[in-house]
Amino acid sequence: MSNVVNKLIFNCLVQYGNVALPQVGSLQVVGSPKRVTFSTKISDNHIPVTDIIAEQGALSDEQAASLYGDWLAGAKGEDGSIKVEGVGIILPQSFQIAEELRRALGVDEEKVVPMLKKRCRCGWLWWVLAVAVVAAVVIFALCPCCNKKCTKSECKDVEVVEVAPAVVEPEVVVEPPKPAINPPAPNKRYNVAVGVFSIKYNARACAKQDPLGIGAENYTIAPFPSGLWVVIAHSTDNIGEAERMRKEYKKIQPDVWVYKRY
């Protein structure tokens, strides 16, 4: 099973450019030329490998999480590193890409490393120059003696009076609460759908984007008859009601349709 998980992680990076590893972090393909970066923070728009395991193996979320946990325990080394065959080695704050993934992505290490080193060498110089310029401007603004029109005797009598800016409280606009909408039941005969996806994670992402403005929690993700995943905005046993809701939603999102469940 460990080889299967390694291959799923490899495929995610090659096909989608990212993968999220629960309890570890995220791997992402970025830049041109391409390189793989690692972050201990998992981004919401990265595909969890547990979702891929569940979908590819027709498993429940709990079963997928258990298999992933077994894989993670075997992949961890004594030094805290995690070795993903064909992908690379994940270190606490970095990632060492494997030759197989490097070839699949077309990563050119000889071009990437020098560019990074050059940027690090000159970056500190710009910061020093910027701080020096800001300091000079502040000193000139605060020192009245720097003004050529001011005599020495006048400069001694000048007092700096600080005036506190007026505090303007922002106007609070109270928006009327949105009416609560119960998520549609997936067992109704007619379903108003806004999207269909091959990966359940992408269907969830569609619901989070809330294409109809009804609230992300008011969509239902259900398996499509062909094995795909459909995002349902409304379900009913009445074809007239389904058509009416389809016309209403179509004003907001053109890609809306009604499909008959059975």
Image (cartoon, grey):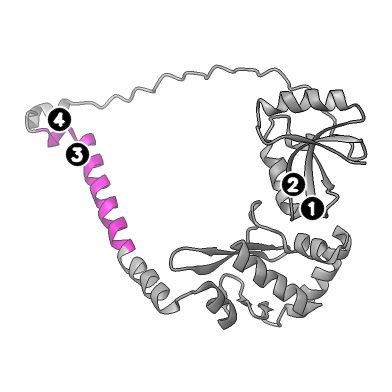
Badge 4 amino acid: Lys
Q: Are marks 4 and 3 in contact (CB under 8 Å)?
A: no
Q: Position of residue 180 (x, y in %)?
A: 81, 25
Answer above or below: position of 74 versus 163.
Answer: below
Answer above or below: position of 226 versus 249.
Answer: below
Depth check, mark 4 against mark 2: the one in front is: 2
Left or right? Give the position of 12 relative to 54: left
- Kindly identify which numbered label has been placed on residue 228: 1
Residue 243 appearing in the image: yes
Left or right? Give the position of 136 relative to 24: left
CA distance separating discs 3 and 1: 67 Å
**In the image, which residues are magenta?**
123-147
Question: Where is the N terminus found, in terms of image quarters?
Answer: bottom right
User: For the point 88% across and 64% down, which residue is it?
Assistant: 63
Give the labeled residue for mark 2. 196
Q: The residue tagged with tag 2: helix, strand or loop?
A: strand
Q: Specify which label sits upstream in the sequence, 2 or 3.
A: 3
Badge 2 amino acid: Val
Q: Specify which label sits upstream in the sequence, 4 or 3.
A: 3
Give the labeled residue for mark 4. 156
Depth check, mark 3 against mark 1: the one in front is: 1
Badge 1 amino acid: Leu
- Kindly identify which numbered label has been placed on residue 140: 3
Q: Are marks 2 and 1 in contact (CB under 8 Å)?
A: yes
